[in-house]
Amino acid sequence: MWNACVLAALLTTSLVQVPPAEDRFAAVRFLEGRWKGTATGEPGRGVSEREYRFEMKGRYLSVKNRSTWEIVKGKTEPEIHEDWGMFSYDRNLKTLVLRQFHIEGFVNEYRLTDNTPDRREFKTVQIENLPPGFRAREVYRIVSKDEFVESFSIAEPGKEFQPYSETRFRREPTAAK
């Protein structure tokens, strides 16, 4: 009798338990933290600093980026690029969305289009302040838990993606508490 009661209690408890919620940010959770990188591409050579952090009780992953490109012939100052972004999870589309706000006035809305163990790809579905038909793609190639390579490509209307820049990021050590 006692064994039957214990068995019934265990079965009831296991049936009532709710499975853990799916981690909707699993594809980009590795990004959380501070990163520094070296960049190459159309603007030349540069360095980047970036921070990813979860906001509003983990509902969003924010990103703040600053890239400084070396002075090139014909210019007296380095080119400085800044952008802010926010990853969110769209429950209707069942995918991650990235919205970026660039210092040049562009606003890019990306969706996750490829999520494999060592690669994440985001393609734009909309770009504000460029003529219609322009597209952008960001690819994150994961090298290790403390290193990734970001490739940024753009496509003019009716054309294929062309590489614009590539940055190799390394995680900054966290301060001991």
Image (cartoon, helix red, strand yellow):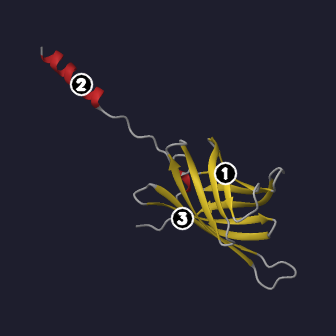
Q: Is residue 157 left or right of residue 141?
A: right
Q: Which circle, 2 or 3, is nearer the viewer? A: 2
How packed mark 1 is, by other alpha carbons closer than 10 Å (few <14, some 14-19, many 20 or more), is some
Point 25% across, 28% down: residue: 13
Image vertical order of residue 163 relative to residue 84, above or below: above
Point 52% across, 46% down: residue: 26
Q: Amino acid at mark 3?
A: Pro
Image vertical order of residue 146 relative to residue 22, above or below: below
Q: Compare residues 160 and 115 and report the one nearer the observer.
A: 160
Query: How many angstroms separate mark 3 from mark 1 (CA)?
Result: 35 Å
The residue carrying mark 1 is 125
Sooner in the amino-acid sequence: mark 1 or mark 2:
2
The residue carrying mark 3 is 173
How packed mark 3 is, by other alpha carbons closer than 10 Å (few <14, some 14-19, many 20 or more), is few
Q: Amino acid at mark 1?
A: Val
Q: Which quarter of the rendered picture does the N terminus lie within?
A: top left
Q: Which circle, 3 or 1, is nearer the viewer? A: 1
Q: Amino acid at mark 2?
A: Thr
How packed mark 2 is, by other alpha carbons closer than 10 Å (few <14, some 14-19, many 20 or more), is few
Q: Position of residue 126 (x, y in %)?
A: 67, 55
Query: How many angstroms separate mark 1 from mark 2 (CA)?
Result: 47 Å
Classify mark 1: helix, strand or loop.
strand
Q: Compare residues 60 and 140 and report the one nearer the observer.
A: 60
Point 54% across, 55% down: residue: 87
The residue carrying mark 2 is 12
Q: Compare residues 160 and 130 and report the one nearer the observer.
A: 130
Q: Position of residue 65 (x, y in %)?
A: 62, 68
Query: How many angstroms separate mark 2 from mark 3 (CA)?
Result: 46 Å
